[in-house]
Amino acid sequence: MRDANQPPMVSTMMAQPLSLNHLLERAGHLFPSSEIVSRLPDKSYRTHRFGQFHDRTRRLAQALLNLGIGRGDRVATLCWNHHAHLECYFGIPAAGAVMHTLNLRLSPEEIGWIAADAQDRVLVVDDILLPLYRQFAHLHRFEHVLVFPFSGAAVPAGEGLTDYEALLAGTDTAGFRYPDHAEDDPVSMCYTSGTTGRPKGVAYSHRSTVLHTLVGCLGDCWGLRGTDTVLPVTPMFHANSWGIPYAAVMLGTKLVFPGPHLHPDDLLDLMQDHPPTLALGVPTIWLGLIQAYEAALSTQPGRWRLPPGMRSLVGGAAVPESLIRAFDRHGVWLLQGWGMTETSPLATVSYPKAELRDIDADERYRRAAMAGVPVPLVDVRLRQDDGNDAPWDGRSVGEIQVRGPFITGSYHRVPVSEDKFTADGWLRTGDVASMDPHGFVRITDRTKDLIKSGGEWISSVDLENALMGHPQVLEAAVIAIPDEKWSERPLACVVSRNGLAIERASLDACLLGQGFAKWQLPERYEFIDAVPRTSTGKFYKLRLRERFPR
Amino acid sequence: MRDANQPPMVSTMMAQPLSLNHLLERAGHLFPSSEIVSRLPDKSYRTHRFGQFHDRTRRLAQALLNLGIGRGDRVATLCWNHHAHLECYFGIPAAGAVMHTLNLRLSPEEIGWIAADAQDRVLVVDDILLPLYRQFAHLHRFEHVLVFPFSGAAVPAGEGLTDYEALLAGTDTAGFRYPDHAEDDPVSMCYTSGTTGRPKGVAYSHRSTVLHTLVGCLGDCWGLRGTDTVLPVTPMFHANSWGIPYAAVMLGTKLVFPGPHLHPDDLLDLMQDHPPTLALGVPTIWLGLIQAYEAALSTQPGRWRLPPGMRSLVGGAAVPESLIRAFDRHGVWLLQGWGMTETSPLATVSYPKAELRDIDADERYRRAAMAGVPVPLVDVRLRQDDGNDAPWDGRSVGEIQVRGPFITGSYHRVPVSEDKFTADGWLRTGDVASMDPHGFVRITDRTKDLIKSGGEWISSVDLENALMGHPQVLEAAVIAIPDEKWSERPLACVVSRNGLAIERASLDACLLGQGFAKWQLPERYEFIDAVPRTSTGKFYKLRLRERFPR
């Protein structure tokens, strides 16, 4: 019987907010000897310990507070991957502010527009990126520009530039105290790559970042531990390098940053000097790397060795099965995740589920090339045009819609609209997918990249992946061209390995051999030098459509 | 420049509450074929799949809603470890209610008092525990008593008992909808074992449980994956079996429940039938198991095999280094965690930190016998009497105080007092410990178990662990006896392997050989048949103090 004299509820847990500051303090106290290795512009290395990182980061926070930066203010970064960028990851939030990572691959006009849209008050910039900064400085005025002397050269006098190192060295942290914050306060901000329309700002909170970090570290996701060595090739301005820097700091994991040296030869050299157990990057990176590696096996045997047992986390674009097989031949497993800026980004991961432990190699590769299974805390549904969800039958498709505590609920300064969020609160990703009975998501296309031929849909992604399994094909991108009879037909833009055209019959046979129907074969093949890419390495099909309007 | 026309903050993440309901839906959809094996009273097995578990759990939730149970109401369980208890773990919260696990090892008077203190409205009880229920039924009136027919016998008519299986079978979930909840709403409740004073209720929330689950699953904590098989020997009424059931449901991990069969022979039989990769229990369980196993190696060779590569999660009391070494000889690693009911319970874990990868075997065992390193989201400090924190020098001691989002902030119906919580919001654990420069916590004693001899402290736990390394000692418990000259002196209560007294000189030599000073040696040794234990398997020193008052 309920006792009316007693409160209905019981005792409560501590109301301790989730906080990046906890991770920073943890790193400083529990892992002071863990290493952060940065490759400098001259290709030498600089190593910091987590103890130094802890001290320098608190100095940065205090310096920002001294500059009058406070809760919710945006502090931009325009940096390669290195230790000072990691200091920004924690030091800017430790001051209560929001780290906004600017994408250095965008045009100066775009960067300037984004900085203005985000209302960035301060910029932290690598000295070797000052020429880029000067190209957009007229578009947005930062109150302070802190220059990290990455190259080791003196920071230029004038221009209102502040030396990052001098600022840290001159800052006293004796009285430093983390400003109070709510766990929903923003800590970082990233703009979408904008394959459709203007880039849009997404802000991550203490809460969403800590939750995403915990989920990502799980054994069935990244499987990260303190004894790992992580090489984030993925830029730190690309969805926070997929959140890996936070994870490494939480667990005391050694970090190896490549700086500006992303050429396959440089990455392979780096892997000899600091062998990673986990490396992450977009498929383009791994495609270039395996080509360089395999070529060197015959021309320069012994020059490089892929770290034994290394795992590679791949995402940001579809991963061809042929790439997974190629790496596996050399003992490296490609672990595919799917997500987007709006999802922090990890939403699904392709991992060996318990009930699939006995599948054969072909099936294992096939599944590894899928987007994978929703991670904990993320709800996924495939919404069809009729408002119903597609069944998990491996065939039916629908738009992927996602919901969870590290999925964005809005965009910066953009009214929440129904083309981005459903009335019941799910994010519309614009990606089209099927799910099979095991819960594996297979992305078939971006909504706008599906090809409607004679009332049936053809997946451009499926065609691309199949074509990239052809021995002479380096890359392939498929777009729709208008067709009077069929409405749309596929056009395949192919980059061949030797630069020469490939026989149409050979390409068709490759597709037919992989189960495509005759009507699904490309209407035409065009041989191009390279597939145009967006700033984050994705196929930029808009450019191909402009080049091949019909 | 801040633009006064724009809001200072940015976009926000979805306000999606952390929820056990998400984990339940995830289990039903992503892992329908994962197994839950329960050992029945007749020692046969029953296997459920996660798909059935999902269905049955929602039926339980709907049935409770039909009974008028709602938000914050307490529903008690008096059950062994089995699938129906797991259904309560998720089904009771799915109805918005709070699962309160009653400890079947307590006296009927204590159980009745606790049920009344918690104001439990409903009880779910195993039929084989009905005799126990009848002993405390007069102390608290439940509105409904649901009897799980664990033995397979018909549920007795009369007494107002409801058949759990009939209730589930007769419940329609076609219209089931999870009631809305806040993430701070309580989901479960557990009473402290009450070694000091009355047991006190601690309630866990959706939020604290999900966070604890994510942290526990990390590679450097339990390292749980979907391909594991987990054997929770730890009772599900003992701090929610340390939270492992939630973790297994989140990841789709096979669960093996021992039912009431906790005898070492039964556990070893179970391990042959369903080999676990991770088993968890208090040290007493593993002590009995290794004795039975090693004895059988000569008397019944081939009868049992410890599952190769199995890890054992041990906690709830100090783990002697000799036990860790004994299991390691047979290929089983004991992973020690420390915590308490108030900490959900995982607060520290002893794992191989990166900077210690090259330590020798002795040092590895020594560290494995420590409480370990604070887990993510938990802050630990060692507060000394003067209000300062003990330095991490491996020698200085202080009371362990903890803080974090899965640490309780209060007790049920007990005013928050300074002997339990500090003014700045930390939980006072009552355990005394040192920490070394690597962040390893070593529990030296309960505050009240320290022995003050001549102005110096002697750790009873250190003496016990050292004595248990003596080949003829099975168990040892050390208490303080009053002493006119020294104020207190240690008395060692020893259980010998063959039941006979051991030479004092041999025991002293064992302690001196492990670095104890002469003044730290026990004043006296008493040989006893067994160390009395609390309901959760801890040494019950109160009973020894009553028996040996001087």
Image (cartoon, coloured by chain):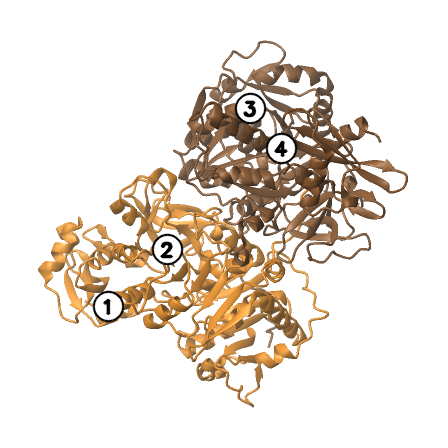
Chain colours: A brown, B orange
List the residue tagged with mark 3.
A263
Q: In the image, are marks 4 and 2 on the same chain? A: no
**Can you say whether B35 is above or below A239 in the image?**
below
Give the number of callouts.
4
Q: Residues within 10 Å of mark 4 (few under 14, many from 20)?
A: many
Looking at the image, which is closer to me, B276 or B539?
B276
Looking at the image, which is closer to me, A1 or B188?
B188
The structure residue drawn at horizontal position 46% and vertical position 66%, both measured from the top left corner, is: B256
Q: Which amino acid does label 2 sit on?
A: Gly
Pointer 1 chain: B
Asked if the residues shown at circle 3 and circle 2 are in contact, with their CB atoms under 8 angstroms apart, the answer is no
Q: Quadrant of residue B446?
A: bottom left
Mark 4 → mark 2, Cα distance in angstroms: 39 Å
Q: What residue type is labelled 1?
A: Ala
**Can you say whether A85 is above or below A41 in the image?**
below
List the residue tagged with mark 4.
A238
Q: What residue type is labelled 3?
A: His
Residue A202 horizontal/vertical position (percent): 68, 37
Mark 4 → mark 3, Cα distance in angstroms: 18 Å
Q: Give the number of the disc on residue B309.
A: 2
Asked if the residues shown at circle 2 and circle 1 are in contact, with their CB atoms under 8 angstroms apart, the answer is no
List the residue tagged with mark 1.
B295
Quadrant in which the C terminus of chain B is drawn:
bottom left
